[in-house]
Structure formats: structure tokens, C-alpha cells
Image (cartoon, coloured by chain):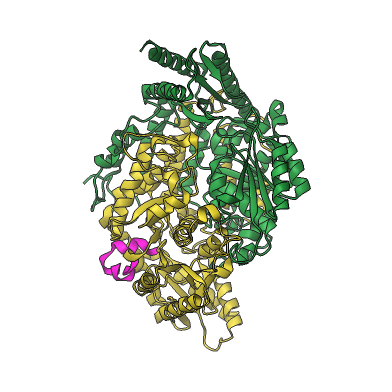
Chain colours: A green, B yellow
Amino acid sequence: VSDDLAPPRGDMDPEVFRREGHRIVDWLADYFAAPERFPVLSRAEPGDLVRALPAHAPESGESFDAIFEDFKDKIVPGITHWNHPAFFAYFSITGSGPGVLAEMLSAGLNVQAMLWRTSPAATELEQVALGWLRQLMRLPDAFEGVIYDTASISVLHALAAAREAAIPDVRTRGLASRGLPRVRVYLSAHTHSSADKSAILLGLGQEAITHIACDGHHAMRVELLRQAIAADRRDGVMPLAVIATVGTTSSTAIDPVAAIADVCEVERVWLHVDAAYAGVMAMVPEWQHHFRGMERADTVVVNPHKWLFTPFDCSVLYCRRMDVLRQAFSLVAEYLRTSEAAPVNNLMDTGIQLGRKFRALKLWAVLRYFGADGIRARLQEHVALARAFASWVDAADGWERLAPVPFSVVCFRHHPDGLDDEAALERHNAAIMDAVNRSGEAFLSHTKLDGKLVLRLAIGNLRTEERHVRRAWDLLTNAAAARQIV
Amino acid sequence: VSDDLAPPRGDMDPEVFRREGHRIVDWLADYFAAPERFPVLSRAEPGDLVRALPAHAPESGESFDAIFEDFKDKIVPGITHWNHPAFFAYFSITGSGPGVLAEMLSAGLNVQAMLWRTSPAATELEQVALGWLRQLMRLPDAFEGVIYDTASISVLHALAAAREAAIPDVRTRGLASRGLPRVRVYLSAHTHSSADKSAILLGLGQEAITHIACDGHHAMRVELLRQAIAADRRDGVMPLAVIATVGTTSSTAIDPVAAIADVCEVERVWLHVDAAYAGVMAMVPEWQHHFRGMERADTVVVNPHKWLFTPFDCSVLYCRRMDVLRQAFSLVAEYLRTSEAAPVNNLMDTGIQLGRKFRALKLWAVLRYFGADGIRARLQEHVALARAFASWVDAADGWERLAPVPFSVVCFRHHPDGLDDEAALERHNAAIMDAVNRSGEAFLSHTKLDGKLVLRLAIGNLRTEERHVRRAWDLLTNAAAARQIV
């Protein structure tokens, strides 16, 4: 019997943990040194892993060696490598070295930070790290922050707070059977779908959502927002919240936040700013004008796991009326009642989730290791790479760019002379994208803008260099050329 | 300049990651070997960490060495050690060796598993691991599982599915201004507070909740449930869901699930079973009778991060009508549209969170490393320790036990002769608990049962041995004696 096997009682022997932990660190270090040895997009077929693994749990324990071998042989081929420098799909993200190291510590400590006392450092480090980030993003002191898992949960809480602020007694009386006026949440045509899901969950329903049309740059048209609110008021519909986005998912478009904030101020409507992806660019002086008005929002979401080098998951909601959020959610069961010498913040009071992971540790480690200047330099490097790619698109015959590039995402497509049928163009570009993705050397995704299928190249990985972007461009032009020859 | 500092661009050098990672593994191995060198409950005072850290992020990056030093010097003293073998508060949990190792890999891979294609292995390993766990828990094949972060989110989805099933078009039309009947969710007086929070979030409101009174063992009285539903039907109130708990948070009481399932079947009401803590005991043949009826539920929650040795966070919702859950939440934005050769499961379709961590890896590693038999043996060991403690309480003069011990939690208090005023007893027991917790050698929490303050001793850590439980008992009896002398 190997000493790798679980002892008859208790946890893994700490010396086995030490040996296996060192092996994993070595594997990860080698992986980070050369993620390009793997295809970016997994080549697994549906069901591959299910077929490769037993249908039942083992009765007897197995060595961690065997588990780690299966990890390498069976799991890794089914991984799409978000660490690959040529991961250009969706929003490209990076869980950096310091972030991963901190996450190892967090996993080891296994802290559940529902209450201040269940680990004072977890609660207070969240306060410290979110204070640092808030200052870097130039948000006023009035904003208090809380870490959730995902932007979906952040926007859910933002809208829940808006509902709490607008509808008296909603917490006790709910929404049904009480003669409430209809309510409305205003999004743009490009607001992230998690806002729609939140409205569903909150019992508002999709009919409570108005998608305001956008201008030629995919930004919300404020005059239409103003008109929609006025029309709703005339019809007895109560405006609940407006969501403005800085950096939409499709094209990183920028809603005119300051003008929207003016409307919300006059109308006394909750303003939520979705800066989940782009919010970190508010740290960079030359980009701050894009965020004008964000400081007047009621809530702002920014995701360190997107473009702040923090391992997934870590989403931050800043709220300038945290009392409203607490009023919506605080509910202290007897078994969770505590008393401290001084007032403390209990994270469970700021949301639906009682259990809270020690997520602040990785964010704090990332902010310290790179420093504000180091972070700004990396963000600007990513923007520069995106702009370089955009310039190649702009200069190439038969290619067109379909949106501005304020951040690190380029929307473009191949549009050869004479091919003007939209359905044909869609098939053509989808085929180009599939060819590039099948190469394993780069991974892009798509969206639709004004009904047109558009390819997206998103930069956000710390390992991405110009050669990777250049290679993606070569793959794209080669794929387009190959289709034209056929 | 140390080579620890961040390079001018890109991520941490992989060789620095390797060196720092090895140091962290060594620190963790030493920590796991002797968590008792730390006090269980942190001795930090409110504000200690905030005062110890700078008010602003550093402009220049710092070495990871410096970060790790601060971790050890400033963060660790503010940690309440959930790994300590004498952590007996709330529900005692364990993030075991194999679980932590798997979490390290997951942090390194940094997979976001929203879509099958964004890492096929993450989606399929979730299917495999949840299939294994389902079989071990003797749930029928009809139950499909999904991993969320916390039980709060699991019950939120269970009630959202119940709402979807009961109220036509709630997704589009919401709850307000449509002449819906009032709705009702039935809990017991001891159902976890996350159910109340979910009802608030879903727009049902706290008035939609009826807390059914419990019997002398803190279990829901089914005849009262039946009466409450009948009375609501007479009043035109629509029953939406019943939550039955196997292993309540206060006293691990067991609601009569089979009888409740009978009611739900007749009344056609959604049945959710909260087995977040105790559900794993359904693996053990001698305990299966406690779970009778669970197989007839619509949804069941069990938390591997509670009593299945899996690092926080990992909560599993089993649903026998996953189509309802998908119908409630599926919403596919264009930029998330994919096509595969065969039908695949996209995790984003089963809930509010678009982003999904690769949590299945740690659960799978734990199930394999310990094996079904190894898990059962450890669970039974924990129950045996709790029963030993209960026997000491039962045999001791001046102590009383206030609830049965079906699992691994003991509810008890000191009740010396002649002290019968409830307020005085409450102060007395709170003082005993505080004295024990201040010792740093054990950490207990409290609850209230039938208006009485009750101390709880919860076993769930893999490192807990009889000597730790014995020491807690000594600390308690010493603290009680010290108060009587004074």
C-alpha cells in the first residue's frame, strides 16, 4: 500500500500534501511558462470526458498520484486555456501569479467570512483592498464596496437595492397583489444579459425592461431614455433603475454616463454603472474622461477577475447607499448573532449569500505585487495591442472594422468585394472564425452589431505579446484567403 | 532590485512563481500538521488589520516576499481557524488535502465554465462528480445536479424554479400589477434564514412565508402544514413551495420528509429539501431512514463544502425538473451563442450566474481520494465523537442536553441547581461560552431553542480527535465551575 493513500482516519498526511503540493506547483510553473503547448480551444468532443471516467465513485480511496495522472491525461485535454496568450474570445482574463499564490493560501485557510468574527482579517482586508481600488478608480469615499462572485450577482444586488429604494415594504410585502404600479428598468440594446436575468429573478419580469436604442457607436441614446421615462410616467409606470455601461460586452461601447446621471438625478432613479470589464481603465488618467459621471452612480460594478489579473471569481460592487442594500438583505438568525467591542461589518448583511469566500486576499496580493503603476502599464499595453490589430484591419483590403476601440476589444469582419449578402457574409465570417479556432493557435468569438455577424478580438491576458496578435491576424487572413480560393 | 519584483510587463516570472509556490506549500503543510499553534477564534480587535495596512495601494509593485511576510504577520492573526481541530462553532467544515490541491489546480487553470466549450472538462466533470454523489446519496437518476457557490444560492434557485412552475409567464410578466393571487412558501420555525432572504429577493416578500411550528424535537409538524395549506387555499392564497430540512442549522433536527412529500404530492406543491449539512449522511446505510422521502423532492441541496471535505465554496442543487430551472433562467445573448456537433449542457443556462468556477475538480478529487468507504467512516467517526460528548453532558450534574443528536451537533447548556431564571441562565451560558472561546483552545457558538440560549458543539473537521472534544468539555466544566466559585 502506497503512503499516498488516505490514512484510515483524518485528513491527508501533511507530508503527502507537501510532496503533492510541490508537484502541482511545478506543473503550474511549467504551464505558466508555456501554455502554448496546448491548443487554446479544447478539441474535446461532447461526452469525451464522461466516457473516459467511471460511472460510479470508487468504494476505496485512490492515491493522489492516480488523481493527478487522470487530471493530466483526461481533464487537461478538455480544458480551454484561458491562460493561453492567444485566448482572444469573450473577455480575455488573467489569473496572475500573485493572484494564484494568494488563492492557494485562501484555499488552505478555508475561511468562511460570513461574520467579522469568523475571520476578522477577511472582512477587513476586503475593506482595505476595496478602498485601494476605489481610490485608484477615482470613486468618491461615499462608495462602500463588497466582493461577490460574479457580475451577475453584483447587478442582481444593484437592482435589488434599487427595488428596495423605490418600493416601500417590498421586503415584507413583496410585489404581488398589492396594487403596485408597473415598474421599469432601462437598459441599452447592448446591456449585458445578466441584467435581464436579474429582472426575471427579482420578479419584475422581462416586460419591466425597456431596451433603449443606441447610436452608431452602440452607446445609449440619452434623448430616447428621457422620452421613455416621460412616456412611462404618463402611463403610470414607475421608473426603477437605469443601467449605463462603460465597455459593453459586444463592442466595449461607452454609454454617456454623465448625461444619463443627469436624467437619473432629475428623475430620482437609481443609476447602476456596469464597468465590469472596463472599470479598471478609470485608473489611467488618459482614460478617465470615459468614466465621467460614474462617480454620481448609486452602484458601480467592476470585476477584478476580468481585467485586473485576479483569478476567477471576484466581482466588486460599489454602492453609495449601502444602507439600502443592508436594509434589503440583513436578516440575522439567532445562531448568527454576535457582539463585539466596537461596531463591525458582517459580510452576510450585504447580500443574498450567507457564505463568503476570502476573495480579498487575491485582489490585495495583485494590487501590491504589480502596484498601481504596473497595472496601468499593463492595461495600456493591452490597449496598444488592440489598436495595433485594429490598424491592420483598417489597412487591409477586404476587411472592415465595425466599432471604435476605446479599450482592448476589436470588432471586425472580412468583407470581400462583391459579397454583400448579409447571410452569406455571416456564413463566410463564421467559417473563418471556426478555421482559426480549430487551429488551436488562437481563439476568437463573435457577436452581432446592427444585425451583422462580427468577429471579436479581445486582449486581456498578461502573456499576450504582439507576436500572438500578429499570428491571429495571419491566421485570419490565411483562412479568408483559403475560402476565396475555394 | 530583487527578481521577486514584477517584470516591467507580463505576469510574474514562472520561476518566481515556482519558488514562492513551494514556500506556500511548505507553509500550508506545516499549518495542516499543527493548526493548534494558533488560537481557534481570532483575538483581533475591530479595526486591527485596517490600522496595520496602508490606506492607499502602492504606486510601485512590491515583492511577493513582502506580501507573504505581511500575510504571516498581519493577516494570520486575524484569521479564525476553520482548520483547527477544536473549531466546533456553526457547522464545522474541512477543506481537506486533496480538495486544497485540486483548488490549486483550479486557480491555476482559471477556467470560466459558462459554456461547455469554454472548458468541456469543467462541465462534464461536474456531471460525473454529481452523478457519483447522487448515487451515493441514493437519489434517483431523475435528479440532475448543478454546482453553485453557496446553499443560499441553491435555495434561491429552488424557489425560483418553484415560482416558475406555479406562475405562468412570471419570467416575462413578473409578479406586480397582474392580479395574481397571494402566494405562500412554507418553512418550519427552524428553516435556515437563507430561505427567507430568497423569498425577499424573488419579490415574494416575507409575508409570503409561513413558519410552521415544530414538535418537541424541532421538527416540522406536518398536520399544521396541512392545515396551513388548507386555510390558505380557502383564502385564495396559492401554495408555492414547502421546504423540509434534514439537519436544521440550530439543532440538526429532521423534518418528516416522507409525510411532507405526501402533502406536497396531493397539493401539487414544489418540495425543496434542505440537506445542505446532513445530506452526505444519506451515504451511510444506517442513516438512510432519516432521508426517507427526499427522493420524492423536486429539489435537494447538499453542500460538499460543509461536511464532505471540499474547500469552500461548493454547494450542489439536485433538481428533478431541471427543464423548469432552465426555462426560468436560460437567456442566450448573441455573443454567447455556440453550436456543437452534439447537444451539450451550458452551465450558464442553469442559473443566475453567467460565470462558473471549475468547482467540480475539488469535489471529484475528494470523492476519489477518500473513496465512498473512507468518507462514510469519517462521517461516522464524527457522529461518534458528537455522541461521546453528548454522553458526557447527559452524565454530568448541572448540565442538560436540549436536542437529540442524529448527526454531529450537540445542543446543551449548563443549568445549575437553583438557577431557573431564563435571563440569568442565558447570561450564565453566554459567559461560559465566551470564556471557552477566549481560551483559544476551542470555539463554540450558540443558538436558541424554545426561547432558551443553547450552546452548540459541532463536529466536522477531519483533524478532530476525541482529545479535542474532551478538552472542550474540560474547558466548559472549568468555566462553569469558575463562575460558580465567583
Q: Is residue A382 left or right of residue B340?
A: right
Which residue range is magenta in the image?
B278-294
Query: Residue A291 vs residue B30: left or right?
Result: right
- Front residue of B204/A376: it is B204
Nearest the viewer among B84 and A469 is A469
Work out whether A171 lies above or below B350.
below
- Residue B372: image location, x then y, percent: 27, 55
**In magenta stretch: residue B279:** yes
Q: Image quadrant of residue A428?
A: top left
Q: Which image quadrant: the C terminus of chain A?
A: top left
Query: Residue most toward the left?
Result: A1
Residue in view at x 60 percent, y 44 percent: A316
Residue B60 horizontal/vertical position (percent): 65, 29
Residue B129 lies, with reference to residue A248, above or below; the image says below
What is the x, y in percent for residue B365? Answer: 33, 46
In terms of image quadrants, where is residue A181?
bottom right
Q: Is residue A370 left or right of residue B362?
A: right
* Up/down of B250 relative to B156, above or below: below
Q: Is residue B309 visible?
A: no
* Residue furthest bottom in the image: B418
Residue A292, position as x, y percentages in the image: 73, 35
Determine the main secondary structure of the stretch shown in magenta: helix
Which residue sits at x=59%, y=85%? B421
Residue at far right of view:
A266
